Image (cartoon, rainbow, N blue to C red):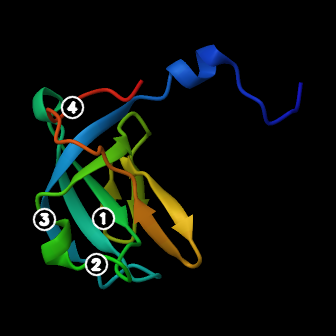
Amino acid sequence: MNESNITFEDFQKVDIRVGTIIEVLDFPKARVPAYQLKIDFGALGIKKSSAQITTLYSKDKLLNKQVIAVINFKPKQIANFKSECLVLGIQKGKDVVLLHSGDSVKNGTQVV
């Protein structure tokens, strides 16, 4: 087994959910250009995240967009902002393309 391999039980600890971005703000204190996002995960509540996605996404394009995020990370302080979840994406050159569901689903739906 490769040292970087994880077990299925390790993977089951990662809580990946679908949420809708309900607020997008500029994040001028971030070292790399980023947005501050508020994401609605339905019954699981609203969580904040910092995302370095300013190259491919305008604030208008992000508002009301459903995204996929890990919601059970320990909160991380980034400058003057506390990020509570990790929005997932795919590296495309130097940019990040956000992962999302092909169809609209209920906020808080778990990725399996």
Q: Earlier in the sequence, mark 3 or mark 2?
A: 2
Amino acid under disc 2: Phe
Q: Residue 108 carries which label?
A: 4
Amino acid under disc 4: Gly
| Residues at marks 4 and 1, CA–CA distance in whole angstroms | 23 Å
Residue 21 image position (x, y, % from top left):
17, 56
In the image, residue 95 above or below residue 17: below
> In this figure, which residue is indicated by the disc labeled 1?
81
The quadrant holding residue 36 is bottom left
Q: Which of marks 2 and 4 is nearer the N terminus?
A: 2
> In this figure, which residue is indicated by the disc labeled 2?
27
Marks 1,2: beta carbons within 8 A: yes
In the image, residue 1 above or below residue 58: above
Q: Which residue lies furthest to the front in this view?
A: 102
Q: What element carries label 1?
A: strand
Of the 4 image quadrants, the one containing the C terminus is top left
Mark whose residue sits in front, 3 or 2? 3
Mark whose residue sits in front, 2 or 4? 4
> In this figure, which residue is indicated by the disc labeled 3?
63
Amino acid under disc 1: Phe
Amino acid under disc 3: Leu
In the image, residue 37 above or below residue 108: below
Q: Is mark 4 on a helix, strand or loop?
A: loop
